[in-house]
C-alpha cells in the first residue's frame, strides 16, 4: 500500500455522512490512489476502503448517553491506533464537534493536516469553539455564506464552498413558467425527525395535527421517516415513505417538519411548511441557556425573520399548528410563499460543491 495516499474521514450523523460519502466519491474520481479509512455510518462504509466503526447509528443501538460516551471513547482509541499504524496524509472531519475536536487534536499533534467540512453551528451557541478549532484545523469549508466572515474574523482559514444540498435537491417546479395550484385535497408531508428520541417526542403531535386537518380540510398525508425508526401504527389516511430519494416528497403541497436538514431540503424544493420541535424539559432549558439566536429553522436564520412559523416546545400544540397550516394553504398566502422559498437557492452557491471541496483538499 506504499504507493497509496491515505485519507481518514469521519462523520457523526446521517446528513453529514451523506455529504462525506459524496466528497469521497469525488476524491476518488480525481485521484483513485487515495486509500480511505473512515468512521461514520452505512454511506461512508460503502465508499471506504477501511471502515473502522459506526458512530452514526449509535442511537439505533438504544444506548443511554453514558453508554454513548464509553462507546465513543472506544472508537477514539481505535482511531488513535489506526493513526499510529497507518498514518493518514490528510484528515477530514464533518460537523459533530464534541467528538471530532479530539480527533483533530490527535491529528494535529502528529503533524497531520486537518480539514473541517460543514462547520459546527458556532453561530448559534458555544462560540468559544471557534478558538479551539483555530488551533487544530488547516482549513474550514463552510456551507452558509455568513459563516465565512465569522471564521475569518476569528483567524480561521475558511472558505464558503456552497451548500451540498444544491447538488442533491430537485426544484419542485419552474415557478415562473407553470400554473401552480395546490392539490385538492392537499397532500401534507409529516416529518418526525431522524433520531429515535426525536421521533418519539414528535409523533403524537403529528398524529393529533393530522387528525384535525383530516377533519377540517380532508387533507391527505405522507409520513417521511427512515424505515427502521418506525415502530408505531399509522392511521389509514397516512401513507408511509421510508425511501431516501425525493421522488414522492417533491409532489407534496406542505410539510410539518423539525428544524435541521429537512427544513432546508423543503425550502430548496419550494415546499411551504411549519417547523415543530420538542425535546425533554431538561434539554430545552439547557439549550435555551446556550443558544443565542432567535430562530431555530435555518430558512428563518438565513432570512433574519420568520419566513416559516416555528412551534417550539410548549408552543407545539396540535390545534395551533393545524390552524397555521390551514392559513398558509390559502391560495393568496401559499403562492407567494412558494416563490419566496425558491429564492433561497441563489444564496447557497452553485452546483459542484463536493468537487470543489475535493479539489481544494487534494491540492493543499
Image (spheres, rainbow, N blue to C red):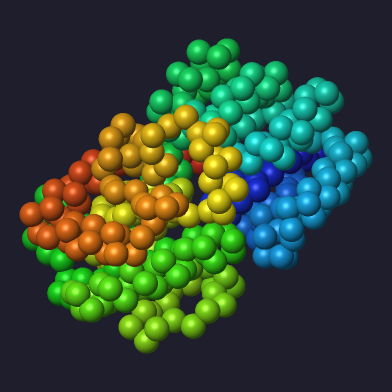
The quarter of the image holding the N terminus is: top right
Callout count: 0
Residue 41 point in image, percent of width and height:
67, 57
The quarter of the picture where residue 247 lies is: bottom left
Along the line of sight, which residue is nearer the eye, 115 or 189? 189
The quarter of the image holding the C terminus is: top right
Please give the name of the residue rendered at 52% of the width and 79% of the height, measured from the top-left corner: 232
Along the line of sight, which residue is nearer the eye, 165 or 181? 181
Q: Is residue 121 visible?
A: no
Q: Is residue 213 visible?
A: yes
> Is residue 254 positioned above or below 350 on the image?
below
- Left or right for 90, reference 195: right
- Left or right for 129, reference 80: left
Please give the name of the residue rendered at 46% of the width and 26% of the height, measured from the top-left corner: 147
Residue 113 point in image, percent of width and height:
72, 26
The quarter of the picture where residue 306 lies is: top left
Residue 181 point in image, percent of width and height:
12, 64
Please give the name of the residue rendered at 39% of the width and 57% of the height, measured from the top-left corner: 316
Residue 75 point in image, percent of width and height:
82, 48
Please give the name of the residue rendered at 39% of the width and 68% of the height, measured from the top-left corner: 206
- Left or right for 229, reference 147: right
Amino acid at each position: 500500500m506504499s504507493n497509496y495516499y491515505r485519507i481518514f474521514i469521519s462523520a457523526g450523523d446521517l446528513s453529514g455522512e451523506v455529504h462525506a460519502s459524496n466528497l469521497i466519491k469525488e476524491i476518488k474520481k480525481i485521484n483513485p490512489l487515495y486509500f480511505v479509512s473512515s468512521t461514520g455510518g452505512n454511506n461512508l462504509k460503502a465508499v471506504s476502503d477501511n471502515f473502522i466503526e459506526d458512530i452514526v447509528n449509535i442511537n439505533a443501538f438504544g444506548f443511554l448517553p453514558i453508554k454513548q460516551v464509553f462507546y465513543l471513547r472506544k472508537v477514539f482509541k481505535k482511531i488513535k491506533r489506526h493513526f499510529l499504524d497507518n498514518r493518514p496524509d490528510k484528515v477530514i472531519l464533518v460537523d459533530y464537534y464534541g467528538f471530532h475536536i479530539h480527533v483533530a487534536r490527535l491529528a494535529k499533534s502528529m503533524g497531520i493536516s486537518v480539514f473541517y467540512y460543514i462547520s459546527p453551528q458556532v453561530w448559534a451557541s458555544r462560540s468559544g469553539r471557534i478558538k479551539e478549532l483555530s488551533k487544530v484545523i488547516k482549513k474550514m469549508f463552510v456551507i452558509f455564506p455568513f459563516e465565512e466572515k465569522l471564521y475569518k474574523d476569528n483567524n480561521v482559514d475558511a472558505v464558503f464552498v456552497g451548500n451540498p444540498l444544491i447538488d442533491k435537491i430537485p426544484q419542485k417546479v419552474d415557478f415562473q413558467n407553470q400554473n401552480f395550484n395546490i392539490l385538492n385535497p392537499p397532500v401534507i408531508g409529516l416529518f418526525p425527525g431522524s433520531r429515535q428520541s426525536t421521533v418519539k417526542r414528535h409523533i403524537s403531535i403529528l398524529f393529533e395535527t393530522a387528525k384535525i386537518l383530516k377533519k377540517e380540510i380532508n387533507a391527505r398525508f405522507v409520513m417521511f421517516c427512515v424505515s427502521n425508526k418506525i415502530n408505531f401504527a399509522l392511521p389509514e389516511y397516512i401513507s408511509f415513505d421510508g425511501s431516501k430519494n425525493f421522488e414522492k416528497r417533491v409532489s407534496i403541497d406542505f410539510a410539518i417538519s423539525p428544524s435541521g436538514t429537512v427544513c432546508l431540503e423543503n425550502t430548496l424544493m419550494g415546499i411551504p411548511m411549519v417547523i415543530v420541535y420538542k425535546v425533554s424539559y431538561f434539554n430545552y432549558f439547557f439549550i435555551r441557556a446556550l443558544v443565542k439566536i432567535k430562530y431555530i429553522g435555518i430558512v428563518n436564520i438565513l432570512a433574519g425573520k420568520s419566513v416559516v412559523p416555528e412551534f417550539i416546545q410548549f408552543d407545539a400544540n396540535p390545534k395551533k399548528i393545524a390552524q397555521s397550516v390551514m392559513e398558509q394553504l390559502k391560495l393568496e398566502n401559499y403562492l407567494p410563499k412558494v416563490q419566496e422559498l425558491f429564492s433561497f437557492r441563489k444564496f447557497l452557491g452553485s452546483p459542484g460543491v463536493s468537487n470543489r471541496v475535493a479539489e481544494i483538499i487534494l491540492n493543499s
